[in-house]
Image: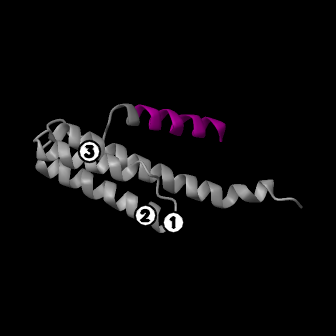
Amino acid sequence: MTRKLWIVSAATIVCSGLNVGTALAADQAAYDAACKAAEAARQSAAEMRYEWNTIKPLMEKAGVAAQAGDYERAVKLCDEARKHGEAAMAQAKHESEAWKLSAVR
């Protein structure tokens, strides 16, 4: 079990370092897809009442970069916003169970 966990962790680290979700030659379509994914993650976190306050500013900066034609930066910012949304959801799930460990019995 420990070996499987280590392999999954190593694969996750390698893939996250490669920026798998970021297109090499970012364009309007790549920005739209990244922005849509970020918005979906933000909405899911908001539905869980655990939206981080860093997500919207990242998405706003991405919009400004896209309007300036810097789609590569816009995609990176949207990917970062998506990661924040996913982390917020993971934190919400963790916190929903973690309180039970600190409750007085």
Q: What residue did someone put label 3 on?
A: 61
Residue 89 position, x and y percent, is 50, 56
Whether 50 is among the magenta residues is no
Q: CA distance from mark 2 to mark 3?
A: 21 Å
Q: Earlier in the sequence, mark 2 or mark 3?
A: 2
User: What is the three-letter code of the residue carrying label 3?
Assistant: Lys
Instruction: Inspect the magenta stretch and tell me whether residue 2 lies in it.
Output: yes
At x 12%, y 49%, the residue is: 28
Question: How far apart are the alpha carbons under marks 2 and 1?
Answer: 6 Å
**Label 2 sits on what residue type?**
Ser
Q: Position of residue 58 (x, y in %)?
A: 32, 46
Residue 13, how many percent across, how many down?
46, 33
The magenta segment is 1-14
> Whole-percent x and y of residue 64?
19, 46
Which residue position holds label 2? 44
Asked whether the beta carbons under mark 2 and mark 1 sit within 8 Å of each other, the answer is: yes
The outermost residue toward the bottom is 47
Structural distance between the alpha carbons of marks 3 and 1: 24 Å
Q: Is residue 76 above or below residue 60?
A: above
User: Residue at label 1?
Assistant: 48
